[in-house]
Amino acid sequence: MTIRHTRPIGQPTRGKTALNRLRQIDTYIALAWSSVLTNGQPLIVDVGYGTQAWTALEMFERWLPLNRNLNLLGVEIDPARVLAAQVYAQPPTIEFKLGGFNLLNILIMSNVRLIRAYNVLRQYKEEDVSAALNTMADSLAIGGLLIEGTSNPTGRLVVFDIYRKTQYKMLVHQELVFGTNFREGLTPVDFQAVLPKRLIHHAHDQAPAAFFDAWQRSLTVAKSAGKIGLRQQWIFAAYHLRERFGYSIDLRKRILRRGYLVLRSPLYP
């Protein structure tokens, strides 16, 4: 028998997310997964939006052009944060509620189209991650997405997992996405500090280490081939990773040029 928790599951985050820090995540979804949000009246949920409501509101504003019937629910486990966010509420379109990973406690049914839980699980123990993801996924509609990941403080570097709810009600990993804004030079190892929680302690294990090594080699080849700009090197390395090393990389130009390297592998169970 499933035990239904009546109290929010989770713990408060630091909550200090700068304006536009999560822009790259929201932009990627609009580029690559817009079909999830374009039909009907989709409900999107921002779990652990922080001391200020702006990350949830920014997400809503960025995706609103995809569907003018979009609905937003911001969820926080800290009552003071929920109270502070009420000034921005516009029920039923924009709401902020007290809650945790067990979203079904505050929802009528499993009808959420997309959940973003960003910079939240990094403070948890690795062994708690799977349960948190699956508990949140209980509220997803079939075909819905769950986004979990981490960024550096400015949002210049992001890494996130995308999961999808299957018709068999299972949460299946779809992509591991690396993103940058090209404002500074970088090396693949720079991303290791912002890997999703499930992966961050395994960056030096065989499969992740091999990927980062292959990526670095691909960038070295790009430079030796005369690719000068950061964007040129990024695109060249993506093709090299796929063609030379066999990684399943999304090679769509609109994805690569915007600074996303999309790997269709979790790299680690």
Image (cartoon, rainbow, N blue to C red):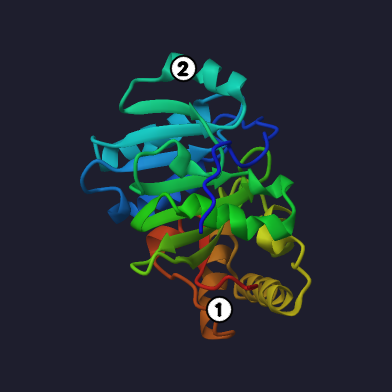
Residue in the picture at 63% in, 73% down: 269
Residue in the picture at 47% in, 61% down: 163
Numbered badge on residue 86 = 2
Q: Earlier in the sequence, mark 1 or mark 2?
A: 2
Residue placed most toward the observer, 141 or 123:
141
Res. 64 image quadrant: top left
Residue 173 in the image: x percent, y percent?
50, 67
Res. 210 image quadrant: bottom right
Q: Is residue 55 left or right of residue 108?
A: right
Q: Is residue 44 left or right of residue 134?
A: left
Query: Mark 1 and mark 2: span between their CA atoms?
Result: 49 Å
Residue most extreme to the front: 1
- Residue type at tag 1: His
Res. 33 image quadrant: bottom left
Residue 48 in the image: x percent, y percent?
57, 36
* Residue 176 in view in this figure: yes
For numbered disc 2, what is the local secondary structure?
helix
For numbered disc 1, what is the local secondary structure?
helix
54 to 263, vertically: above or below: above
Residue most extreme to the left: 40
23 to 1, vertically: above or below: above
Residue linked to disc 1: 240
